[in-house]
Image (spheres, helix red, strand yellow):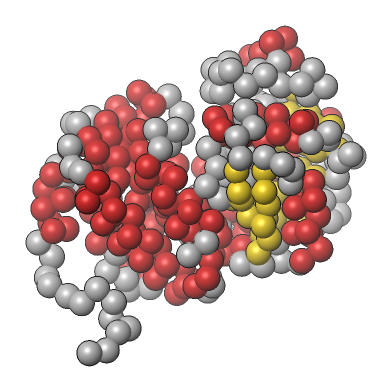
Amino acid sequence: MAKIGMIGAGSWGTALAAHLSRCGHKVEIWSIMKDETDMINNTHQQSVKLPGVILDDTVIADTDLERVMRDKDMLVLAVPSAFTRSTAASMARYCRYGQLIVSVAKGIEEDTLMTLTEVIKEEIPNCEAAVLCGPTHAEEVGIGLPTAIVAGASRKEVADYIQSVFMDKSFRVYTSPDMLGMQVGAALKNVIALAAGCSDGLGCGDNTKAALITRGIAEISQIGIAMGGRPETFSGLTGIGDLIVTCASMHSRNRRAGILIGKGKTADEAMKEVQQVVEGVYSAKAALQLADKYEMEAPIIRAVNRVLFGNERPMQAVEDLMLRDSRIENSGLEW
């Protein structure tokens, strides 16, 4: 049995807490909001963000960060990506040397273009930062539906340990040394999912969705490889796998927000209606900066930014994408 501190009581943190407790581990959850910790302790569920998922009564929640972090084999950092740095800074004073921290949020920090494990290491240099990500909706993990995911770490023994803690009959865990590629795929797929949602909101069809997914993974791969990620990663669970599920499922808050934007809502209106953090809105600007930095064309990422922040109509963005200059599909192929 492992002792685990879940830092964050949102839908994903709660789903992972439910899963880990089913695996026989001792889980404590931290939230900065007392109403959340009271809800979990009194009703054994996060009824606002993940209704219907009942937590084992051994799972307890607390607003005391130091207490939740104390003597833990693993800390799982599950706050939204925009709060990763501030939360890691608060954790630093209580973190013992070599403490394993597993990041499960998805995003690229806008100001620095750092991955979340890089942010964690900058704030807590003495920790062991790792990542867990893949095509995993909280709503399905919370109730134990079969799921596959990837544990990434700089050392094989660390990835193997994370795999051993999380893996069971409903939660298959693979390992990877490519933390950078995993996190780029996990962050940028949310931007493409906004485009896929806009397409649905406009009433476009399956053909459009297939084109967005296929050309979207091409953009993600080009940027990720330029940053130093491995090509194989983008054809795996944290690349095309995560992109497919986020573009296709109504569990995806990014797709749902995109649908609302396609129907005429602003980004702010869409986020308020979804009532959860829409990571793609925060990652879109970072994605555009990365495309500029590595001199990538990235037409879908640029179109999403124009719609979100430049007042371009979604249908105009579709027309702009369709009427781009003619080109070969894969420049690596020769006639």
- Is residue 288 placed above or below 256 in the rendered structure? below
Q: Percent position (x, y) of residue 142?
A: 62, 30
Q: Which quadrant holds residue 159?
A: bottom right
Any part of residue 111 in sight: no
Q: Percent position (x, y) of residue 333?
A: 30, 84
Q: Nearer the viewer, residue 326 or 118?
A: 326
User: What residue sits 64% from the left and 32% below the top?
Assistant: 144
Q: Percent position (x, y) of residue 9?
A: 64, 28
- Is residue 231 placed above or below 215 in the rendered structure? below
Q: Which quadrant holds residue 265?
A: top left
- Give the position of the C terminus as an image quadrant: bottom left
Q: Nearer the viewer, residue 118 or 264?
A: 264
On the picture, is 286 further left or further right than 201?
A: right
Counting the numbered discs, the total is 0
User: What residue sits 17% from the left and 37% below the top?
Assistant: 203
Q: Residue furthest bottom?
A: 335
On the picture, is 274 further left or further right than 112?
A: left
Any part of residue 219 in sight: yes
User: What residue sits 62% from the left and 28% below the top?
Assistant: 143
User: What residue sits 86% from the left and 49% below the top?
Assistant: 96
- Is residue 96 placed above or below 250 in the rendered structure? below
Q: Which quadrant holds residue 275?
A: top left
- Give the position of the N terminus as an image quadrant: top right
Q: Percent position (x, y) of residue 210?
A: 29, 53
Q: Residue furthest top?
A: 42
